[in-house]
Image (cartoon, rainbow, N blue to C red):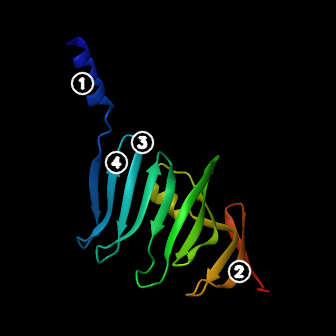
Amino acid sequence: MKYIILCGLFIFFGCKKEVSQKIYYPNGKLNYLLNKTTDTTKITFFAKNEKAVMHLNFYKDYFIGAIVYSKNPNLPFKDSINIDSVKGPHFYGTEYIIFEKGAKVMGSYRYKRNLDFRKALQSIQPFGIHNTFDMKGEVIERTEYTIINDTVYNTKIALE
C-alpha cells in the first residue's frame, strides 16, 4: 500500500501541467495563444482574420526547434526557421523556404536571448548570405549581411 501511495504521488507531481492563455488584439480578435508547461511555452500567433500564422516553442529565454510561419497562404511555399544553436547572449537559426520540390536555404539569423519571448522575437538580425527566390525556387538575388556592434550592414552580391 505504501508503494502505491508513493507511486501515485510521483505520477501526480511528476506530470507537467499545461496552462493555456489567450491574448487578444484591442478589437477583440485573437492575437496569440500560449500553452505553458514547466519549462516550455508553445506559442501560436494569429492574423487579424484569426487564422494561425506562426508556431514556435520558447524555452526559458530562447526559441527551440523550428519557427514555422506563413507569410501568405496563397504562395506556393512555406517558411521555417530552424533554431541551430545557443551561444552566450544570442541564439541562431537558419531560414528555409519549402517548395514542392524540396527545401532551400534562404539565410541565417541571430536573436538576443530574453525572458520575454516577444522581445526575443523582435531582436532578429540577418547575417551571412541570404537568397531571394522566384516562385519556382530559383535564386534571383543574393545579399550578404554583416553584424557589427548590433548594427546590420548589407551588400548585394552579383549572380553569376
Say which mark, if any, is on residue 36.
Answer: 4
Which of marks 2 and 1 precedes in the sequence? 1
The residues bearing labels 3 and 1 have C-alpha atoms spaced at a distance of 23 Å
Q: Earlier in the sequence, mark 2 or mark 3?
A: 3
- Quick one: SS at disc 2? strand
The residue type indicated by label 3 comes to Asp
Q: CA distance from mark 3 to mark 4?
A: 8 Å
Residue 140 coordinates in the image, percent (x, y): 67, 87
Instruction: Tell me the number on the disc at residue 8.
Output: 1
Q: Which residue is mark 3?
A: 39
Image-quadrant location for residue 5:
top left
- In the depicted view, which residue is nearer to us: 138 or 143? 138
Few, some or many C-alpha atoms within 10 Å of disc 1 (few <14, some 14-19, many ≥20)? few
Residue at x 45%, y 52% (from the top left corner): 58
Q: Position of residue 112 (x, y in %)?
A: 58, 55
The answer to whether mark 3 and mark 4 are in CB contact below 8 A is no
Residue 73 at what x, y percent from top left?
Answer: 40, 80
Badge 2 crowding class, 10 Å Cα cut-off, few under 14, some 14 to 19, many 20 or more, is some
> Which label belongs to residue 142?
2
Going by the numbered disc 1, the residue's amino acid type is Gly
Contact between marks 2 and 3 (CB within 8 A): the answer is no
Quadrant where the N terminus lies? top left
Quarter of the rendering containing residue 12: top left
Question: Horizontally, is 129 left or right of 109 in the view?
Answer: right
Q: Earlier in the sequence, mark 3 or mark 1?
A: 1
- CA separation in Å, label 4 and label 2: 39 Å
Q: In the picture shown, does residue 158 fall above or below 91?
A: below
| Pointer 1 or 4: first along the chain | 1
Q: Residue at x 24, y 73 (%)?
A: 27
Label 3 crowding class (10 Å Cα cut-off): few <14, some 14-19, many 20+? few
